[in-house]
Amino acid sequence: MRTLGLIGGMSYHSTIDYYKGINDAVASRVGGHASAPLLLSSVDFRTIRARQVAEDWDGAGQVLAQHARTLQTAGAQALLICANLMHKVAPQVAQAVNIPLLHIADAVAQQARTLGQSCLGILGTKWTMLDRFYADRLLEWGIGVVQASPDDAEVASRIVFEELTRGIVRDDSRRALLEVIDRLASQGAGAVVLACTELPLILRDDDADIPLINSTTVHIEAAVRFCLGEVA
């Protein structure tokens, strides 16, 4: 198997899901006592969050790039950022190393194609929902995006940062997120991406009237395929 480096800690709640999900899948497919050869470099999310609030994306990119270099030096043969939003600095991270970066939006786009969906809504933090870095990556795969309103993006972002990244799950917040999903569907989205790795803590795949693409799940699948040598 090939060794994969994980840049985690954004937040640690979802990084746990990555570690468990990748190992569970490898154990199931290979059998016996198999587990995935993983290296984890986990950031202090407090420092990343401060840079997000300050819109210091270059500074955030430098932090993640250093973690990427650490993982490459330790023997990682590819990298995975265990977060959606921090793919905003994915180009900076990728340029810091000479091993592949498994981009989360690529995994989402492949799942959208499997589902026969060509237009998606994005649910996540306000930057993931409103900035172009995620939508443009999907567009490279021929997948269009319905953009949420700024108000809906603020609602989702508040729930992510004030609750989910702290391990808080509230029923009223679940209802608020489902209302955002309904509005994206009314604007033409055939499916909605749970484009924050904390969202599966509060939303299940069958909670909405349209398909929900769990970005964590599909990113984990891409990781497993790499580890098992099923992709180049």
Image (cartoon, rainbow, N blue to C red):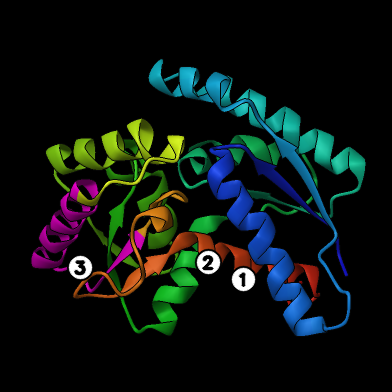
Q: Secondary structure at mark 3?
A: loop
Q: Name the mark on residue 221.
A: 1
Tell me residue 63's x, y (percent). 65, 25
Q: Is residue 46 above or below residue 76?
A: above
Q: Name the mark on residue 69.
A: none
Q: Are the residues tagged 1 and 2 within 8 Å (C-beta)?
A: yes
Name the N-terminal-most of marks 2 and 3: 3
Q: Secondary structure at mark 2?
A: helix
Question: Residue at the location (84% across, 50% down)?
Answer: 76
* Magenta span: 172-193
Q: Which image quadrant is residue 23 in?
A: bottom right
Confirm whether the magenta stretch covers residue 114.
no
Using residue 23 as the reference point, say whether residue 91 is left or right of it: left
Using residue 95 as the reference point, say whether residue 187 is left or right of it: left
Q: Is residue 142 above or below residue 171?
A: below
Tell me residue 8's x, y (percent). 64, 41
Q: Nearer the viewer, mark 3 or mark 1?
A: 1
Q: Which image quadrant is residue 112 in?
A: bottom left
Name the N-terminal-most of marks 3 and 1: 3
- Location of the N terminus by quadrant is bottom right
Q: Amino acid at mark 1?
A: Glu
Q: Are the residues tagged 2 and 3 within 8 Å (C-beta)?
A: no
The Cα atoms of the two marked residues, 2 and 3, are separated by 20 Å
Q: Which residue is mark 3?
A: 189
Q: Amino acid at mark 2?
A: Thr
Tell me residue 169's x, y (percent). 34, 46
Q: Which residue is mark 2?
A: 217
Question: Residue at the location (31% across, 75% down)?
Answer: 206
Q: Are the residues tagged 3 and 1 within 8 Å (C-beta)?
A: no
Q: Is residue 43 visible?
A: yes
Q: Main secondary structure of the magenta part?
A: helix
